């Protein structure tokens, strides 16, 4: 016994309606060709893997830095201050200068040559 088209549409509507947002997102991803949809899903998986790898790297850097500064502080708070404060100043200055350099490069890239 085959269900009618109307019954099939009602069944789909019943299960799709609660998840309209997810369904719309999936439909938008699949609007292109099937190859394009597969590429999108493959690229999304790569982005998630890259993000997980980046987060693990950043967490390990933070843990290492905290452990190093804690060890340094236990050894000699005065020497820690003498070493860490200038280092933080250099890091802050590098970030400020890096921002200005990026703006300068962006401005130079948008200007025509000649």
Image (tube, rainbow, N blue to C red):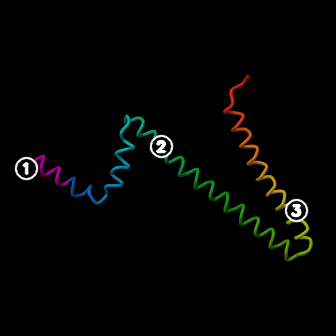
What segment carries the magenta color?
Answer: 1-11
Q: Comparing marks 3 and 2, which lies closer to the viewer?
A: 3
Residue 42 badge: 2
Residue nearest the observer in this picture, 21 or 61: 21
* Residue count near mark 3 (Cα–Cα under 10 Å), binned few <14, some 14–19, many ≥20: few
Left or right placement of residue 83 versus residue 54 in this view: right
Residue nearest the observer in this picture, 48 or 85: 85
Left or right placement of residue 20 versus residue 80 in this view: left
Residue tagged by mark 1?
1
CA gap, disc 3 and disc 2: 45 Å
**On screen, 33 above or below 52?**
above
Q: Are marks 1 and 3 in contact (CB under 8 Å)?
A: no
Q: Is residue 9 magenta?
A: yes
Q: Comparing marks 2 and 1, which lies closer to the viewer?
A: 2
Residue tagged by mark 3?
86
For numbered disc 3, what is the local secondary structure? Answer: helix
Q: Which tag, 2 or 1, sits closer to the chain's start?
A: 1
The C terminus sits in image quarter = top right
Please state the horizontal and vertical placement of residue 85, each as a whole percent of the image: 86, 66
For numbered disc 1, what is the local secondary structure? Answer: loop
CA gap, disc 1 and disc 3: 80 Å
Please state the horizontal and vertical placement of residue 73, each as a whole percent of the image: 85, 74
Q: In the rendered image, which quarter is residue 18 located in?
A: bottom left
- Residue plotted at (77% across, 70% down): 67
Please state the horizontal and vertical placement of residue 26, each as a whole percent of the image: 36, 48
- Residue plotted at (76% across, 43% down): 101
Residue nearest the observer in this picture, 13 or 63: 13
- Residue plotted at (17% across, 50% down): 9
Dominant secondary structure, magenta: helix
Q: In the rendered image, which quarter is residue 84 located in?
A: bottom right
Q: Is residue 80 magenta?
A: no
């Amino acid at each position: 016994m085959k269900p009618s088209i109307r019954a099939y549409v009602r069944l789909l509507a019943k299960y799709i309606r609660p998840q309209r947002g997810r369904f719309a997102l999936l439909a938008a991803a699949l609007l292109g060709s099937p190859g394009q949809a597969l590429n999108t899903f493959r690229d999304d998986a790569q982005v998630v893997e890259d993000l997980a790898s980046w987060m693990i790297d950043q967490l390990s850097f933070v843990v290492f830095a905290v452990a190093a500064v804690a060890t340094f502080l236990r050894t000699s708070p005065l020497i820690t201050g003498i070493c860490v404060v200038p280092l933080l100043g250099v890091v802050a200055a590098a970030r400020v200068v890096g921002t200005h350099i990026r703006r300068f490069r962006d401005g130079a890239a948008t200007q025509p040559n000649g």
